[in-house]
Amino acid sequence: MFYKFIAGILVFLSFFVLDSFQEVTAQRVNNHRLECTLAIPCPKDIWPRVDFWIDVYSRWVSTDAILHDKTNPERVYRVLSGESCGGKKVSDVVERHKVEIRKKLKNLADDIDAGIRISNSEDRALLALFPKRSVAIIKDAIDGIRCQSGNRDRFYQALKRYDLYGALVRNVLSRAGLPSDIQYLPLVESFYDPAAYSRLGAAGLWQIMPGTAKELGLNLTATVDERLDPELATYAAAAYLSKSYVSLMSASKKILPEATSSDVSPFVITSYNYGVNGMRRAIVKHGPDYSLVLDNYESPSFQVAVKNFYATFLAARHVAKNANRYFGQRDQIKPIDYQTLLLTTPVSLKRVETVFGISRADLRQYNPALTRFVWQEWRLIPTDYRLRLPRDNRSWKDQITTLSRMTPESDKSLFSRYIVKNGDTACGVANAFQVRCLDLIELNRLDASATIQIGQRLEIPKNLDREQPLVRDPGGYRVRKGDSACSIAHKFGVACDALLSANNLARKSILKVNQYLLIPASVQQKDQYQSYVVRQDDTVCVIASKYGITCKILLETNGLNLGSLIFPGQALRIPQFNGSKIVSEGGGDLEHVVRQGETACGIANQYGIKCEQLILFNKLGNEDVILPEQKLVIPGVWAEKYQHPLGLSPLDQTFDFSVQVADINGKKIFRINAEATETLEHYADWLMITDLDMIRQLNHDMSSESLYIGDVLLLPITSEKQLDTFQRERQDYHRMLVEEFRQTFKVVDVYPYTALRGDSLWAISRKFDLPVWIMTRYNPSLRSQVPHQGDQIQVPLVEPRTR
């Protein structure tokens, strides 16, 4: 027994020593024989870089953390088994090894500089990664250690999806006249996953962003996201790459007339990640020499991911072409094949399942473009959708005839009862059915946390025509030559004094070209309302007190709750009843029981009211002491509202995306504020017009590239139907962004970030790897105002959901 015990200890120690040895010894990247063509060249300078990425895809798995040099990725220091580089928080183990490597590199450089002979085997292995034995190069490497997770297991799964969709992609590329080997690019973009969704909002096989999608002719609505359709997304990607070839070839020939498609090809592939304009600037500066650009082109956005993009493409191509060598003989999956049925009327998911006898799982595989709104049965499959049906021994002729003879369905048939499904929240369901969350909570008598269970039946409130939220957000405008404050105000249908007040300007103030002005929101006047434009330091309750009404009345009139933010330039409706002010509404004020350590002003701040209001209402003197268990009445705050989850997640709250209407000399003008991911192509689609110039001419020939969040735009609306359609489609589009994000990610916490000098909304979003639209959800004021140094920005902490 004793000997068995000693043997066990020795085995344990041998594993420990071996593991330690593997961790601290520099790793050699394998050399691979690349197969290159004129269409897809392999510049010799990047071969070592490609070798590294081939090993990432074929040698190391996702639980291997590879510590390597970010500039020369083939310089691998250590591979840590059982670790990962994913996520924002680096593991303590990975960080500890980084610190050790930095220390070893510094000591190595110092020893070489001092002429000390390198005799330690570990140090010699480290030195071997620097063939030139240059002290300067070794010192530069100290701060360039990067962590990369292996991808062998993910790539193996990706090959199965490649079997499924590869033939489809090749067919589209052939029709577009593009090199067939571009079929391997989705392996880099999404691991060939049609359902892939990135933290920044890129989606589908080709990882297309929402704004780019519309420019490429893809539809994004509440019910259909064509980025998720492999065939349609490939047509869009092919259009982008074809345009890139033309643009970059033209730029190359201006510098080098004899430039060929082989010279330009690496730039075209890289443009899919970096953008055509970025690659064109690089070519203009250094010529169509890809290796020269990698070594010398400098730009804040030309970083590790971009510099490695073409190398990762070549690596993915090599591994896929030689899959049997790296993964052994695989069972090939039959390529997906289908026929399409153009729907002439909306149809429910249940009806399709019943008529065609196809399972929901199969329908989902063949129709990935249908969104959560359809799969959760919040919406019908829309008219003009091309329903994909498996192409097998069934002709579907009889089923198609049966479907065409059935009574047409409407979305309203879904709007009475709903059975809760996985991933649902009460407010998410309410938003999907276009009703107020609080109404749904009250009707179904949910608890204070609005808890719902899978399988629970919810009654949907029958108030589908509820008016949009009445608070209106301000927009922004950049001053142009010849503008004056009052001419700008007139253009957008607001009072000149309101514009001056919102921007802290006087009548004599001088405007500068490109100066950014807040454009106060516009509210259509009705007899019982007057309008108030929010000013600096206003609160809802302060505004209410000015007009002799309660907070509750003002909040409800404007579709707000106690958690809503207001900011300068917003327009609020002030209710008036027969010309008299409302003094009180009787009863319902909230009582607060004082706790140990609380102060009057601290309590006031907690409820969003002025300290003076609390003191006066409770007849306290400035020096009065409040005691634990003492009851204070909170003026204008009503108790029943605290029985519901007013701290709704910003993803559940309904933003106002409606059109603002104003009158200029009896003529109506229609204006909106641009939101994240929106383009002029979106607006034209929602307005049901095909001529973008109709929008451009109203807005100083604005283009999608010059459109910023918060910019005020005028719209060529000529009918109520056009107005209603625009507002509905726009609201549904933004709901779709939220729901697609929530399918893949969840917000687990929110933490503050202090804006630095020069920070922009885009830069902050990229810093935290988040889409811009989600930052505006958590920071509504950023929809119309730029962040300033010292501002507290709320940043959601996001984690992926398990599939």
Image (cartoon, helix red, strand yellow):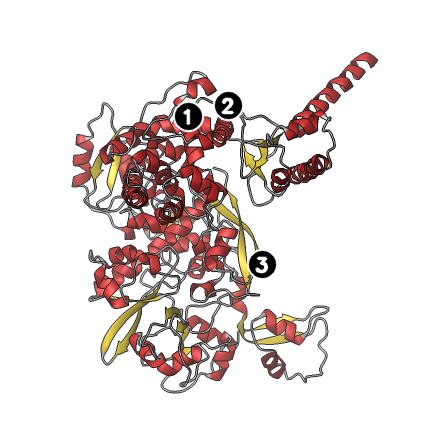
Looking at numbered disc 3 in the image, what kind of residue is underneath it?
Pro
Callout 2: SS: loop
591 lies above or below 323: below
The picture quadrant where one finds residue 467 is: bottom left
Looking at numbered disc 2 in the image, what kind of residue is underneath it?
Asn
Say which of marks 3 and 1 sits in front. 1
The picture quadrant where one finds residue 675 is: bottom left
The residue pinned by badge 2 equals 31
- 250 vs 516, nearest the viewer: 250
Say which of marks 3 and 2 sits in front. 2
Question: Which mark is first along the chain, 2 or 1?
Answer: 2
Say which of marks 1 and 2 sits in front. 2
- 649 vs 778, nearest the viewer: 778
Q: Dot 2: few (<14), some (14–19), or many (≥20) neighbours within 10 Å?
A: few
Callout 3: SS: strand
Is the C-beta separation of discs 3 and 1 under 8 Å?
no
The residue pinned by badge 3 equals 752
Marking on residue 318 = 1
In x, y percent, where is residue 396? 20, 30
